[in-house]
Amino acid sequence: TNSIIMKAIEINGSIKKYSSTPKSWKGVFAGFDLLSDEALETYGFYNVVEPDGYDSQIHDLGEIEFDADNSVFTYSKSNKTWSQSLADLKTQKISNLKNSAGYELAKTDWYITREAELGTSVPSSITTERAAVRSKVDTIESEINALTTKANVVKHTYKGWL
């Protein structure tokens, strides 16, 4: 579904956007901002919505225009372009992934240091957890490397480690 951004009105061929509906309009009355959408439309105020399928990660917004079929103002959209190569975007995404993994592993690094310094065994639950993080990184890195478009690399997300 399209999210509503604001209201707009076309005046003499120019579209004016409002982040909130004016409290009065052309001196007609106070409380103009309290009118229903249907009532506001009789004055020419329509919702501004994002274009269908818009994703700010991979699209840029173009010019605003009135969509008469749907009685809303909306924007054209275009695919973003990235100056980095597909390989560079993958490298950056994987680097961010490994930094996040490093943060996760750092939480239990003291167990590893204690074992190296004092010979105190690392609990098996900790070694299992750490192995799971490394395994998850390997899986996600493979997913990223398998992507074939810059947009898919940019959109790729990973949540949680286990």
Image (cartoon, rainbow, N blue to C red):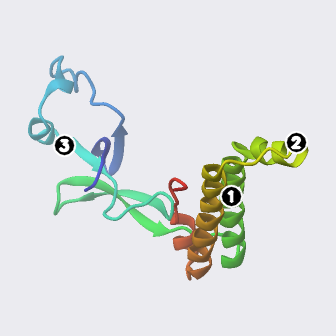
Residues tagged 1 and 2 counted as in contact (Cβ below 8 A): no
Judging from the image, what secondary structure is the residue with disc 1 in? helix
Which residue position holds label 2? Answer: 118
Q: Quadrant of residue 8?
A: top left
Q: Return the residue nearer the eye: 121 or 42.
A: 121
Q: Return the residue nearer the eye: 124 or 96.
A: 124
* Drawn side of residue 16 relative to residue 101, left or right: left
N-term-proximal mark, 3 vs 2: 3
Which residue position holds label 3? Answer: 44
N-term-proximal mark, 1 vs 3: 3
Circle 2: residue type = Leu
Give the crowd class for mark 3: few <14, some 14-19, many >=20 residues within 10 Å. few
Residue located at (34% from left, 47% from top): 15
- Quarter in which the N terminus is drawn: bottom left
Give the crowd class for mark 2: few <14, some 14-19, many >=20 residues within 10 Å. few
Q: Return the residue nearer the eye: 10 or 147.
A: 147
Front of the two marks 1 and 3: 1
Residue 18 screen position, x and y as percent: 34, 36
Residue located at (56% from left, 79% from top): 147
Which residue position holds label 1? Answer: 96
Circle 1: residue type = Asn
In the rendered image, the residue lying farthest to the top is: 30
Mark 3–mark 2 distance (CA, rounded to whole Å): 76 Å
Q: Quadrant of residue 113?
A: top right
Front of the two marks 1 and 2: 2
